[in-house]
Image: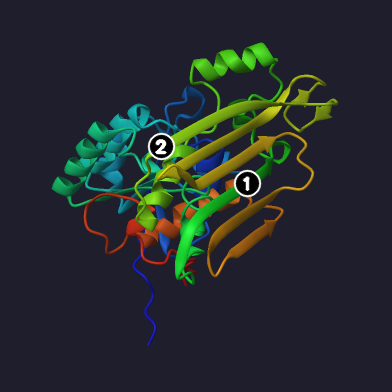
Amino acid sequence: MKTSPKTLRVVQYGVGPIGLAAIRAVLARPDLELVGAIDIDPALQQRDVADLAGLRRPSGVRVSHRAQEILAVGQPDVVLHSTQSHLEDVLPQIKDCLEARANVVSTCEELVFPSVRQPRLTREIDALARSKGAVVLGTGVNPGFVMDTLALASTSPCQDVSSILVERVVDAALRRVTLLKKVGAGLTLAEFRAEVRNRRLGHVGLVESLYLVAAGIGWELGRVTEKLTPLIAKKSIRTPHLTVKARQVSGLHHVCRGFRGGKQALQLDLQIFVGAKNPYDRIVIRGKPPLDIRLEGGLAGDEATVGMLLTMARGIEGLKPGLRTMLDVTLPHFRSGK
């Protein structure tokens, strides 16, 4: 006989667009109970999250910047964390959650596979999580699923794999304003280059996805290359948030390659720009047998990111405490909560 899953107590850390979408999803699930919301924005303080999320009925949960207090009072089973992209920026937030002995499922891109670029912080988080009996997992749609986890899962029927190519084309016009700014939409070429140099622009996580796939396959990469180039609009394009004029930057093209024995084994090719006419996701595997999988329209990024947060809130159950990756999760899949 099927038994109902335990209700998970949830705190949402970060009440931006993704956080609000996650709040709406949590409030709609019978197996999840929202017990707190954390954000440092002064304009959000003491606002009911249901009101911020456009829901009619008050939730009784109000936003607060007092993270330690919210975590102590709420006693969450899991924190859904969606604030920033770089691990060093979110480290204090992750530590606060772990000190409260709460599991953490985060959209921090560098947290998806942090050991390559942040080995010291990886060891620090892993040690603290183990000592508190908690799990920390970085996930999302990209990185976290479409260009790494899904690519790895697609190799399941292969007897042998010689190379993997993952392509993703995203129409930034359909996405939130923060993503438009992150890909440089509306900037001049000089402004784009300056923002890249200052690490204020670009897609974070492609290198992490590359190493996650390599680790999953069991490949040791001898060389990794990364190239980020601007895409220029040929004509003026209006979005709900901004207008990109002709000859301004419409987005970016980011390519990461991994080599074994001097030969290319992995290529992750990402284009995010305003006006992409035919978005898609594609996974091409050279192996036995070969596979060529294409998702027309591509995976809806924001909705899929929230879906991954909720899926992994349950998916981390049973994992050993510590800093984990999607390689540690057994067959991630949707759970109805009913």
Residue on which disc 2 sits: 223
Q: Secondary structure at mark 1?
A: strand
Determine whether 70 is above or below 232 in the image: below
Task: Determine which of the numbered discs, if any, sits on residue 168 in the image.
Answer: 1
Q: Position of residue 71 (x, y in %)?
A: 29, 41
Q: Can you see residue 66?
A: no
247 vs 306: above or below: above
* For residue 81, side relative to residue 28 (left or right): left
Q: Is residue 279 visible?
A: yes
Which residue is rendered at x = 17% and y = 48% of the image? 130
Q: Position of residue 329 (x, y in %)?
A: 35, 60
Quadrant assignment, res 107? top left
- The residue sitting at the front extreme is 262
Does residue 135 appear left or right of residue 225 in this picture? left
Query: What amino acid is at disc 2?
Result: Arg
On screen, residue 74 versus residue 312, left or right, reads: left
Looking at the image, which is closer to me, 123 or 206? 206
At a point 21% along the width and 38% down the height, the residue shown is 123
Q: Earlier in the sequence, mark 2 or mark 1?
A: 1
